[in-house]
Image: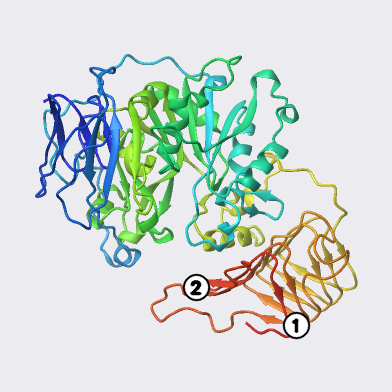
Amino acid sequence: SRGLACTAPLVVPPALGRGRTGALFSRKASSVRWVSTSSRVTSAKADGRVGGQSRGSDKTALKRFRVRSAEDPGAPRQGVTVTAIAEPAVTNQEVASTPAPAPRAPPPPAKTSLEISEDAPAAPPQPKRAPVHKDLLQAVVMAGGPSTGNPLTEYECAASLKFAATNRLIDFPLANIINSGMKRAFVLTQFNSYTLNQHVHAAYPPEVFGFGSDGYVDVLPSFQTIDDQGWSMGSADCVRRHYKAGALRGPGFVPAPEAYLILSGEALYRMDYGQMLKTHNETGADITIGTARRRLSELDVTNLGMVGIEENADGTFQGGKVTRFLEKPDKKALEAVAVCYEGAEFLSDCDVHVNMGVYIFSKRAMDSLLGRIDCVTLDPESEERLDFGKNILPMAVQHGFSVVAHQHDGYWQPIRNLREWYDANLALCVEAEGPFAYSAASMIDHENPLHSVPRCLPPARFTGKVEMTNSIVSEGVLVGGGSSVTNSVLGPCVVLGENTTIIECIFIGHQETGYLHGDGAADVGSGAVLRNCVVHSDVVIGENCFLTNENGEKDKNGLDINRVTVDPETGKGYVIQDGIIVFMPGTVVAAGTVI
């Protein structure tokens, strides 16, 4: 059977073959037929733009797309409507109570949970490619997605959030690029990108780093075309749009890229991408995935991608072939990719290889997996997206592309919600437990410098006796006598009154001294007590306030309760999320307030 093969929510060319639903499209004349091995059978008519209506369940989300046939690139683009089948996910509670599988070798490459048509074509064999030089590796940092549920992203995107008082999350992948000796970087933006755009342009002019005429760090905002109207629908769709538009080619005076380093702008880690490129070149892979080996008991298994890797002859996994790629796996699939040792009693005692969101794609893989998709149109109200982890990489593994793993040995922390951002910031303040390379403190390393916007601010100053324990204090900070600060981060130009008590709090800070309420006036009034708080810029807290969330604000099942007391017109007020009190920008807390 020839024609179009499908993996929901997109259509892939014949070179990619099989689909997640086990369905195969065959094109005859003007019709498109979906032969399904599941209980649901769907048919559609191609109309030259968007195809027919699915006859599946009303609760099943519909995805629409257009793709060019590989056999006839000049043919009219066909449109089809596809249904997605939800995948059950295992919970952390199930992992902790499930007995550990017996130690065994990694499983052979799997098909899917549904049978796949045998005559679906696979990726054609290709001659071993030439090694890619680092100067021809184009870095692409994805920084455009929203962080759902995080009150801090009401005003800026997740990649623009402050970290370690004076840096932003985007600084860490960009520092890795620069410290790896790379010269070409694009930052793709979309959601609440104003502060991010400002920061990248101010902090990363090419001449500062000696890039010369062939180096650049540039921002590529989201855009629309006649075919692609609306926001980019997922990480892979965002990269696909820029790639097809030629924006990722870079300026005409530099050589065209031979491979693409695709990164998340919302994760903390230190990596030499030159070593990852070495793995990519030595294995001759089409795609190399950065992975981190972690204990299941330390992970939220409902919110991460797991990778199954063939073990090498020497017992290591570096450069090993990726056999499975799972997003939100069920228990059976998780057992198949877990690496268990003697003495592991429960599944939570085993290790897994976690997708870090760091990829190297060869040009061939970019052309075959993204370059042939003409249009992706999904319902903006649905949660369906065209993502690398959920769609593109599982497809590549299934359909014969050479996908290998580059194992990261060190600290890695994705920032997907308020709790992860808060804990990672405070982890900088305490002494590292275990190897330094696996601690948050390794993010502030003088051997691997960070870059940010230079500021001309006075040094921090303490008036009188101040007790400061395991805390980060930025420039321009003024702390009144008799105050105590423990396990906290004070951003630039924060002013604390006398006899204040600050415990496990993060102050975002201001751009300059006296920014809101006069030079030397206190952000936190005398006698105030704050615990487990995030205080945004331009917040004024009166004297003798007691802001500790002493009652916890959690329900009996341990689920988060969002206690929202924010004025919908001004956006001022506070939110309690996961036990953390967040004061929104511009909020004034009256003297004597108790929360």
Residue at coordinates 69% horizontally, 60% vertically from top-left? 508
Where is mark 1, residue-wise? 591
Judged left or right of residue 188, residue 503 is right
Q: Write the residue at 11% across / 49% down.
A: 40
In which image quadrant can residue 406 be found? top left
Q: Secondary structure at mark 1?
A: loop
Residue 373 in view of the camera = yes
Q: Is residue 353 left or right of residue 60?
A: right
Residues marked 2 and 1 touching at CB (< 8 Å): no
Residue in front for this viewpoint, 241 or 277:
241
Amino acid identity at mark 2: Asn
Q: Establish if 386 lies above or below 368.
A: below
Inspect this view and state whether residue 182 appears. Answer: no
Q: Nearer the viewer, residue 90 or 448?
A: 90
Which quadrant is the C terminus positioned in?
bottom right
C-alpha separation, residue under disc 2 versus residue under disc 1: 24 Å
Type of amino acid at the residue the image marks with label 1: Ala
Q: Which residue is mark 2?
A: 562
- Residue at left offset 32%, top offset 33%: 321
Element carrying mark 2 = loop
Q: Residue 428 in the image: x percent, y percent? A: 64, 57
Tell me where residue 418 appears, x and y as whole percent: 54, 62
Say which of 535 and 102 sits in front.
535
Instruction: Say above or below: 592 vs 81.
Output: below
